[in-house]
Every structure is written in structure tokens, then in C-alpha cells.
Amino acid sequence: MDRTRMLLKASVIFAAVGVIMGSHMAGAGSPSLSPIHAHILVVGWLSLFAFGIFYRVFTISKTSKLANVQTWTAVFGSIGLTLGMYLHYFEPGPIPDLVYLLFYIIGGTILAVSFFIFAFIVFMFQEEVTEN
């Protein structure tokens, strides 16, 4: 798996969704999507982009299972948190709010785990996390 490409592609998708959402808010003159918009851009675009650049710049083994878990949890957690936020705020269907809230909370928890794994990787692989 090419972690860098996957993270960068996912970040671009989040950026596009954030831009579309921001354009909609500007056109509608309504800030109702602001919390979701902010999370999509910060968590989805910036964080995934930063993770991707980190794995490109520093030589963490491509076979590192921990780095692979961090990558997948970052992507799934970002999707879960932001989609869960949207569903929780707008309740688009007849599904009970608890289901949306769980989606939101579980996504956020997965993302938090990803951040802790990333911090562990940064400190665990100190020899690899150096400038060339």
C-alpha cells in the first residue's frame, strides 16, 4: 500500500467537499454548515495531507503495520467523524438520532486513535524521523 498516495488522494477529496460546502454557504448566506465545513477542511484535508507528507519525507518502512493501521484509521476516522457530524446535525432520514450520534462518536474515536498512533510513530521511529 502506498500510504502517501492514499492519504493525499483522500485529502484532495476532503478539500473538494470543503470547497463545495464553503461555496454553498457563501451563496446561501447561511453559516449552518460551518462546524462540519471546518472539520472537513481541518481533519480531512489538512491532517490527512500532513500525514501523507510525513510518510513521504521521512523513511518509515512501507511494511510497517503500525503505520498502515495509522493510515487506515486516519482515513476511516475522518470519514466517520465528518459524515457522522453531518448526519447528527441534519438527521436526513427516519433513522433514530442515536445511530447518527454513534457514527459521529465512533468516527471521532477512531480518528483520535489514529492521532495517538501517529504521535507514537513520530517518537518510536526517531532515527528515521530526521532530515537527510
Image (spheres, grey):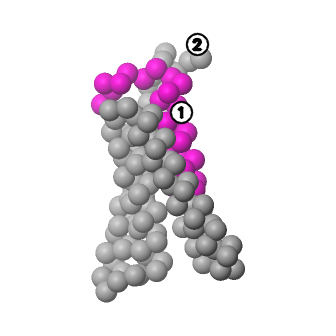
Q: Nearer the viewer, residue 126 or 23?
A: 23
Q: Nearer the viewer, residue 17 or 75?
A: 17
Q: Say which amino acid is labelled 2.
A: Asn
Is label 1 in a helix, a strand or a loop?
helix
Question: Could you tell me residue 9's position as x and y percent?
Answer: 46, 44
Residue 108: in sight, yes or no?
Answer: yes
Q: What residue type is disc 1 on?
A: Ile
Which numbered marker is on residue 132?
2
Would residue 130 appear left or right of 82 to someone viewing this image?
Answer: right
Mark-to-mark CA distance, 2 and 1: 15 Å
Q: Residue at x 35, y 61 (%)?
A: 106
For the residue pair 104 and 53, the one nearer the viewer reads as: 53
The residue most toward the top is 132
Position of the C terminus by quadrant: top right
Q: Which mark is residue 111?
A: none
Quadrant position of residue 6 = top left
Is residue 67 visible in the rendered image? The answer is no
Return the x and y of residue 89 as percentages of the image width and height.
48, 78
Q: Of helix, strand and loop, which mostly describes the magenta segment? A: helix
Does 50 sit above or below residue 17? Answer: above
Q: Earlier in the sequence, mark 2 or mark 1?
A: 1
The range drawn in magenta is 40-65
Pinpoint residue 93: horizontal percent, then vertical percent.
35, 83
Q: Residue at x 57, y 61 (%)?
A: 18
Look at mark 1 in the image and give the residue it sits on: 53
